[in-house]
Image (cartoon, grey):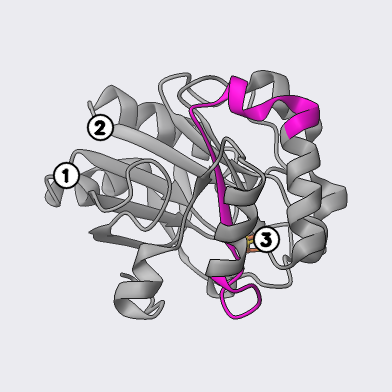
Amino acid sequence: MDLRLTEIFYSLQGEARTVGRPTVFVRLTGCPQRCVWCDTEYAFSGGEKWPLEAILDQVAGYQAHYVTVTGGEPLAQPNCLGLLTALCDQGYEVSLETGGAMDIAEVDPRVSVVMDLKAPGSGEQHNNRLENIPLLRPHHQVKFVLADRKDYDWARFMLDQHQLHQRVGDVLFSPVQGQLAPGELADWIVADRLPVRFQLQLHKLLWNDARGR
Ligand code: SF4
């Protein structure tokens, strides 16, 4: 079983529930979406084919507890499902970062899914797979990346309509870097008493988004 990889690296988790934890990142190549503010366009194409065993060997070399499978859109490669299960079988705590357009039904139930719901400002709202919402579990997380007040109001509507905070452990609200001032988003969340977790991407604060960190 092969997968096309853009990179494997060891760093600190930049976001979500395990932010700050040393983590191995397995970045798969390819994504069918084109969010206007995407910060991983280098993962859209290229990469190298890796056999599953070679990926597992590389991951093991870092001696980490946490592994995040990301992209691009990892679920765009069907073999991603087997990779996730193999990582869980090896005893890692595994998370999957997925853009919300692909079916999560077959993801190993041990995996913590971090699923985006794309707001209007991304240009990809029409591809949100709402059939995924009933599949979300308490160890999963939902992430909204917000470019402006219109995005925020939409996210607030989705939160309320689907009672997302009742379904998942954390609902994450992040600003698009350079487009929405973090303090402004924080003020809106506080003013509206939203049951969400505000987050900034730690790796961008630490390393200004350098690739592979
Ligand atoms: S889904 Fe993720 S990788 Fe794909 S375009 Fe959007 S932000 Fe980029």
Q: Residue at x 73, y 72 (%)?
A: 36
Task: State left or right for residue 116 relative to residue 206.
Answer: right
Count every numbered label the image shows and give the total. 3
Residue 28 vs residue 31: left or right? left
Q: Count neighbours of disc 2 (C-alpha within 10 A) and say few if under 14, some if 14 to 19, many if 20 or more.
A: many
Membership of 190 in magenta stretch: no
Q: Are marks 1 and 2 in contact (CB under 8 Å)?
A: yes
Residue highlighted by disc 3? 146
The mark nearer the N terminus, 1 or 2, is 1
Which of discs 2 and 3 lies nearer the camera? The answer is 3
Circle number at residue 92: 2
| Quadrant housing the N terminus | top left
Q: How far is mark 1 from mark 2, CA to CA?
A: 8 Å
Please identify the residue farthest to the front as the structure is shown.
191
Instruction: Identify the disc placed on residue 64.
Output: 1
State the mark number for residue 74. Answer: none
Chain part drawn in magenta: 160-182
- Mark 1–mark 3 distance (CA, rounded to whole Å): 31 Å
The residue type indicated by label 3 comes to Leu
Question: Could you tell me which residue is drawn at 41 percent across and 77 percent down?
Answer: 209
Could you classify mark 1 by the number of other residues whose Cα lies within 10 Å: few (under 14), some (14-19), or many (20 or more)? Answer: some
Residue kind at label 1, given as amino acid type: Ala
Relative image position of residue 169 (x, y in whole percent)? 48, 27
| Amino acid type, label 2 | Tyr
Q: Is residue 38 above or below residue 131?
A: below
